[in-house]
């Protein structure tokens, strides 16, 4: 497929059927968002920047400033610098060396905070971001957590998936800023109002009422704050996995399906595989795989790192435990979102 610019190439990612195993019922298809140039957030960066330029919020040559430690940073670096803008990324010490190398090479200005904030690393990053906005009053802040063009960017993902599959009964996706899951869910509901939406979070993330645990090891999903783009009314069910379980699932994904991915994709894989076993073969499950494994070579895929973190043997239960929504969880658990207080 031919494109005139690198920005034009964003999207049109493959949809691959997973083979799963003997317990599989429904068919599971992975939407391989990791096969964008830098990952899933390339879609968001493209949509936000193009809309901001069109509407005058981003002036020609003005800088772009955002808080990110992963694929959003790379997406902004790709689109922003290609279109002639300085890109400033505010991040924290958890950022991996591969992402840092990508950002440096693409010409980004990187600002690493050195102290955790009152609400985790996210709040520390936002404090530094506001300082930079004061220093650069012409700068544009994409605000990926609250900008509606984050979820709106996934209209095309939904259209691509429907074109590939025709009908989707269940959507399974990880959640952090809320953009990919909620945006895809909203768009897919226009094709099938009865579609079931399943969110995948990590233990120690506050998005679904759990206590914050900033020391959690997973990256790419979960949060220490609740983003404005999280639309609880779209979500039917939430699953939480702890670090060991997420890493075990990520290793299983690589070994069984030959997909070298990050822990967001691994967790989504575990949940989609289990849901498949609960449904008939006539159902289609779409699982969004956002992240490649390259940025995790020194962590998830490094035996010394795992040993140092006390993860000597990565294990994952064959099924999650059902809990009421307000239960504090420490291992793979799931809860029904229907009828949950303010989230209805």
Image (spheres, rainbow, N blue to C red):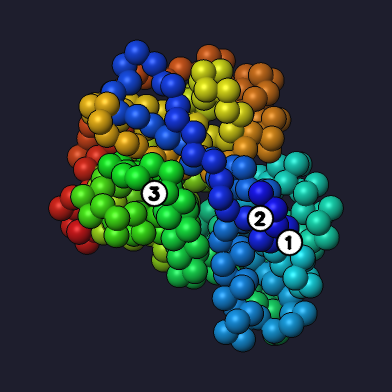
Q: Earlier in the sequence, mark 2 or mark 1?
A: 1
Mark 3 and mark 1: span between their CA atoms?
A: 26 Å
Q: Reply above or below: 176 against 80.
A: above
Residue 135 in percent (x, y) is at 74, 80
Does residue 14 appear left or right of residue 317 in this picture?
right
Q: Is residue 241 above or below residue 129?
A: above
Nearer to us of marks 2 and 1 is 1
Q: Which residue is mark 2?
A: 9
Residue picked out by circle 1: 4
Residue 244, percent from left and from top:
49, 26
Above or below 27: residue 9: below
Q: Residues within 10 Å of mark 3 (few under 14, many from 20)?
A: some
Label 1 neighbour load within 10 Å: few <14, some 14-19, many 20+: few
Q: Residue at x 50, y 62 (%)?
A: 153
Decide which of tag 3 and tag 2 comes sooner along the chain: 2
Q: Dividing the picture into quarters, in which one does residue 332 lie?
A: top left
């Amino acid at each position: 497929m031919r494109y005139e610019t690198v920005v034009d190439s964003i999207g049109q990612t493959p949809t691959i059927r997973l083979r799963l195993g003997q317990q599989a019922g429904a068919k599971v298809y992975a939407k391989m968002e990791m096969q964008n140039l830098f990952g899933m957030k390339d879609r968001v960066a493209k949509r936000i920047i193009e809309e901001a330029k069109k509407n005058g919020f981003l002036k020609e040559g003005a800088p772009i400033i955002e808080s990110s430690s992963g694929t959003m940073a790379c997406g902004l670096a790709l689109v922003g610098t290609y279109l002639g803008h300085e890109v400033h990324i505010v991040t924290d010490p958890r950022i991996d060396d591969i992402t840092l190398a990508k950002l440096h090479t693409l010409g980004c200005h990187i600002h690493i905070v050195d102290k955790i904030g009152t609400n985790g690393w996210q709040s520390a990053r936002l404090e530094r971001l506001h300082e930079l906005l004061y220093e650069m009053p012409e700068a544009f802040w994409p605000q990926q957590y609250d900008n509606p063009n984050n979820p709106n960017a996934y209209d095309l993902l939904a259209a691509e998936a429907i074109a590939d599959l025709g009908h989707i009964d269940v959507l399974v996706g990880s959640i952090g800023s809320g953009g990919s899951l909620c945006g895809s869910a909203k768009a897919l509901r226009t094709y099938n109002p009865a579609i079931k939406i399943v969110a995948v979070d990590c233990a120690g993330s506050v998005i679904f009422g759990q206590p914050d645990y900033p020391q959690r090891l997973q990256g790419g999903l979960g949060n220490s704050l609740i983003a404005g783009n999280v639309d609880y009314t779209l979500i039917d069910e939430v699953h939480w996995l702890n670090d060991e379980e997420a890493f075990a699932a990520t290793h299983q994904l690589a070994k069984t399906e030959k997909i070298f991915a990050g822990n967001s994709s691994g967790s989504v894989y575990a949940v989609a595989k289990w849901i498949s076993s609960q449904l008939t073969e006539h159902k289609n499950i779409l699982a969004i795989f956002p992240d490649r494994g390259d940025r995790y070579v020194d962590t998830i895929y490094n035996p010394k790192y795992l040993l140092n973190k006390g993860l000597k043997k990565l294990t994952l239960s064959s099924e999650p435990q059902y809990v009421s929504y307000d239960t504090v969880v420490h291992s793979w658990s799931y809860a029904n979102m229907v009828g949950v207080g303010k989230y209805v």
